Image (cartoon, helix red, strand yellow):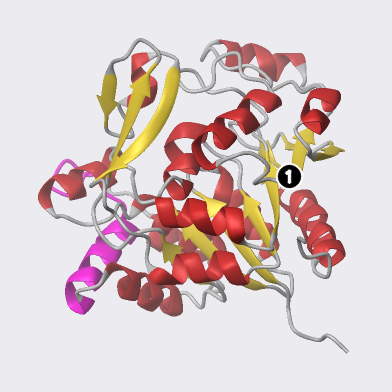
């Protein structure tokens, strides 16, 4: 009788990934989390200007979302200094990761040790162990460098890529993808949080060779400067253009109309609901899961943590034994 926990890999970054992980951590899963390290804005950007290190910001948020310590400790880790001094704008968690990196001399080891301090029951994997820069080739032929700069140009993105050109993912990343029963691509900024995780050659090869089922949780809102006028099919096709077709098995889309007052607020940021055409998605070979997923509690709408986690766990349980042929 099979008693081992399903091996699940979550890929992503940005604000969507922690929402998903806060729910998933309560389920019996052998969880690996592969996190982008291409961020160069805010506290992370200032740190990277002074220290050659993978971006710690998304890693910090993942540790906080998976922590099993009391809320005060997690809030302390996420605390952002406000005083008008050299620490203003910096997150304590970023500084802790930088300090541990200097102690260990290895960013992945630093992440593991900080994760252990917060009793994280998952393997958090920075996709690479060194500094990288994200670039975007725009439709007009121009190249924009730097994760934080790309959406600010408000141009249509053709594709994104990383430098150095020969950058290699840490071996654990490829192994986790190959060993997984299910791979979840989290919601998040498509070109600046999701794709930087999966556009390295070894990761692309692993995603095309793995027997794991791959499920993509599509964004609920477009992002100005990245996915203007994109529907769900456009999101999937952008991923396919970078890593190859038929790499995703299932997509989760939000089906309920978003309340008008929320839409009106997002319109001020030129952000609109991501629509979908089920037939168009199915023509790409996708199984489509339609669900009402919105959490309206915060300043911005997010996926409902508990509802999404339950949906994903049910999917994982159903698919564990249905390995790709």
Quadrant where the N terminus sits is bottom right
Q: Residue at x 51, y 78 (%)?
A: 119
Residue 232 higher or lower than 266, as above or below: below
* Residue 293 lies in quadrant: top right
Can residue 212 be found in the magenta stretch? no
* Residue 127 lies in quadrant: bottom left
User: x and y percent of residue 209 in the render?
Assistant: 60, 59
User: x and y percent of residue 139 in the render?
Assistant: 40, 14
Q: Is residue 281 left or right of residue 202?
A: right
User: x and y percent of residue 213 in the render?
Assistant: 72, 57
Which class describes the residues within 10 Å of circle 1: few (<14), some (14-19), or many (20+)?
some
User: x and y percent of residue 234 in the render?
Assistant: 63, 24
Q: Residue tagged by mark 1? A: 304
Residue 304 higher or lower than 104, as above or below: above
Q: Residue 82: in sight, yes or no?
A: no
Per the image, label 1 sits on a secondary structure element best described as: loop
Q: Is residue 45 left or right of residue 284?
A: left
Quadrant where the C terminus sits is bottom right
* Residue 244 lies in quadrant: top right
Can residue 100 be found in the magenta stretch? yes
Q: Is residue 292 left or right of residue 30?
A: right
Q: Residue at x 31, y 42 (%)?
A: 162
Q: Residue 37: in sight, yes or no?
A: yes
Q: Which residues are magenta?
A: 82-104
Q: Residue at x 55, y 39 (%)?
A: 188
Residue 42 higher or lower than 29, as above or below: above
Asked whether 124 or 25 is in front, the reply is 124
């Amino acid at each position: 009788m099979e008693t081992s926990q399903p091996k699940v890999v979550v890929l992503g970054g940005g604000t969507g990934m922690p929402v998903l992980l806060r729910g998933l951590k309560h389920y019996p899963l052998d969880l690996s989390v592969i996190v982008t390290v291409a961020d160069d804005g805010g506290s992370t950007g200032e740190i990277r200007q002074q220290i050659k290190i993978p971006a710690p910001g998304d890693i910090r948020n993942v540790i906080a979302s998976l922590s099993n310590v009391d809320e005060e400790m997690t809030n302390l880790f996420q605390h952002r200094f406000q005083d008008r001094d050299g620490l203003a704008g910096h997150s304590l968690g970023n500084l802790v990761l930088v300090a541990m990196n200097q102690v260990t001399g290895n960013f992945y080891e630093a992440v593991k040790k900080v994760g252990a301090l917060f009793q994280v029951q998952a393997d958090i994997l920075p996709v690479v162990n060194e500094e990288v820069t994200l670039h975007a080739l725009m439709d007009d032929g121009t190249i924009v460098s730097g994760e934080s700069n790309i959406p600010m140009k408000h141009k249509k993105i053709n594709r994104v890529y990383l430098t150095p050109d020969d950058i290699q993912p840490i071996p654990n990343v490829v192994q986790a993808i190959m060993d997984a029963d299910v791979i979840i691509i989290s919601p998040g900024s498509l070109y600046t949080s999701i794709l930087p995780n999966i556009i390295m050659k070894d990761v692309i090869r692993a995603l095309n060779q793995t027997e794991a089922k791959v499920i993509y949780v599509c964004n609920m809102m477009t992002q100005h400067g990245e996915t203007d006028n994109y529907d769900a099919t456009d999101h999937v096709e952008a991923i396919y253009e970078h890593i190859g077709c038929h790499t995703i098995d299932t997509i989760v889309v939000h089906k309920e109309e978003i309340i008008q007052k929320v839409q009106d607020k997002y319109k001020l940021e030129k952000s609109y609901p991501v629509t979908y055409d089920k037939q168009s998605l199915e023509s790409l070979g996708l199984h489509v899961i339609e669900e009402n997923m919105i959490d309206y509690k915060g300043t911005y709408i997010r996926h409902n943590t508990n509802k999404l986690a339950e949906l994903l766990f049910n999917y994982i349980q159903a698919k564990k034994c249905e390995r790709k042929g």
